[in-house]
Amino acid sequence: MTINANTVSHVDAVVVGAGFAGLYMLHTLRDKLDLEAAVFEAADDVGGTWYWNRYPGARCDISSYHYSFSFSEEIQQEWSWSEKYAAQPEILAYLGFVADRLNLRQDINFETRVISSDYDEASQRWTIKTNKGHTVICKYYISGVGTLSYAANPEFEGKDSFKGEVYSTSSWPHHGVDFTGKTVGIVGTGASAIQAIPLIAQEAKHLTVFQRTPNYATPLQNGPMDEQEAHAIKANYGEFREKPGPLWPEYLSRKCGSPFLRKVLKRSKNTWKAAGKKAVFHCGWAVMATSFLTKRPTKSQQSSFARRYARVKDPRTADLLCPDYLYGTKRQPCETNYFETYNRDNVSLVDIKSNPIRRITERGLELDNGDGYVFDCLIYSTGFDAFTGPLFNLNLKGRKGVSLREHWSEGPRTNLGIMSHGFPNFFMITGPQSPSVLFNMPLGIEQHVEWIADVIRYMEDNGLESIEPEKAKEDDWREMVEGIANSTLMPKTNTWYTGSNIPGKPRSFMVYLGGGAAYKQECDEAARNGYDGFILGSADVQREAVAS
Ligand SMILES: Cc1cc2nc3c(=O)[nH]c(=O)nc-3n(C[C@H](O)[C@H](O)[C@H](O)COP(=O)(O)OP(=O)(O)OC[C@H]3O[C@@H](n4cnc5c(N)ncnc54)[C@H](O)[C@@H]3O)c2cc1C
């Protein structure tokens, strides 16, 4: 619902964000649970990731038909994708279509940022405040703020002194940018930069790429969607979503991961090693990395692998593009003409690992060894403060005024990656310690939304006022998440999965690697057992339980 500023409003539920997560949550609360729900979204329209990340070349790198909602057969049948891997404008149009189809925009408060979130123990309600002067009191508070929505902007000395045009891939101007005839510098060579660099190079007079970490990148092999394949998917959507078929790999379906895994995980810590191998084999971006994930590749294996993809003529540039981390332990970017771009006369690659950026100047930047570069435009593509960044930005204060930042001072503490002790009735869609970015995100979002909706229905049906995880359960869950991760090589590399791309962020592995199917069973089992591991109760009962 639309909320008036400068008055105190009461609703059943507040949702933050209008990407995949916020849209489906709103539809579920309003149209399935018949609750009053308000959504706050910082942007002026729906789309989330696909609203903000409009840089040239932005597109999904799991197939378009997988990268979409499954909850409505009508929506599945009405929408057709034009490319195997849809570009940002098409995904944004899709989310706009979903919002219109379900009349969602009318209940979203756009251009409104949530700035504080306080839990009142006496009334067992959250008070949410926004930058536009809204104050809303609600029983249920649901975060759809995304995992990759808070940019990691390195604090270079003199950052504000640059007088040219400055862009960030994670909040690209809507009118697009014409680089024709311009000298351009781009800082970063992660997944977004790998998509953008080939297209910017085609326009720019000269493009200088500042690389700290070379990446293994796999050819995307995009192309127009094959009509027969689309027809086959639409005729078998149920199966397509559920399990692998000749046209669709397992790791993008709900059956991601093996059913045996859950049993193995429950047995003992020692079996995590085997479980981790199996889980990673089946799951997400890492599917191609299986052979290396639990065994270190030799240096020559790594270089030969990288060189195979480094279709680069200049040997010095090819060497610089060779990754030096364990294959598969970072998110696998997908590329189209990325390596060939370095064969162009107007593109140069500069290593800022051995010779870091010392400062930003009025006309460009300067490296540690004194080398200076001058540009018309400077682009930052430096990644995200993933998982926790957008959540901390909600300024949550839970029971006894303890902030989420304090509670998570040594890394996230959750049960199932959905709720945290001391923050009753606060739910995180694709929160840290859930499969999130190492699963098919729309399917992961749907599973969370539906699990949260079931909790709310249960609470309403049973006259309950609040729910939060037992503190001890958070320790168990963290041990499980880290245990699986530590049985692979994934935590050994500095990545945003571990938080180590952000100076000072506590290191912990923030993705459940057990696979979507095993994870769903964990969530379903907790629900089936009357929300085992959660403190649930009416006002008095719960306060007693927490005090004891
Ligand atoms: C460039 C890029 C490519 C990606 N490609 C893929 C892919 O191929 N496959 C895949 O599975 N995933 C991919 N992802 C991950 C992607 O983020 C998810 O797939 C999905 O879009 C997440 O949806 P969401 O609704 O959870 O969050 P988001 O889409 O991130 O939306 C969160 C929304 O919350 C809003 N918000 C945050 N904080 C506040 C606040 N305090 N107040 C108000 N509003 C707030 C933001 O403005 C944003 O609109 C990609 C991510 C990026 C950045």
Image: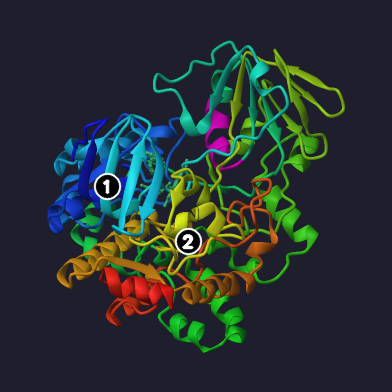
Q: Amino acid at mark 1?
A: Ile
Disc 2 packing (10 Å; few <14; some 14–19; many ≥20): many
Q: Would you say 173 lies left or right of 7 here?
A: right
Look at the numbered disc 2 and give the secondary structure of its residue: helix
Q: Is residue 460 above or below residue 46?
A: below
Residue sitting at the far right: 369
Task: Determine the CA span between mark 2 and mark 1.
Answer: 38 Å
Residue 440 falls in which quadrant of the image? bottom left
| Residue 226 seen in render | no
- The x, y position of residue 36, in whole percent, is 16, 49
Q: Residue at x 26, y 30 (%)?
A: 5
Q: For the point 23% across and 49% down, which residue is it? A: 26
- Identify the residue shown where x is 22% and y is 62%: 236
Is residue 125 shown in magenta?
A: no
Give the residue number, with chain letter if any, for mark 1.
137
Q: Amino acid at mark 2?
A: Gly
Residue ID for mark 2: 284
236 w.r.t. 351: above or below: below
The magenta-colored residue range is: 190-199
Relative placement, left or right, of 208 versus 474 is: right
The answer to whether residue 194 is seen in the rendering is yes
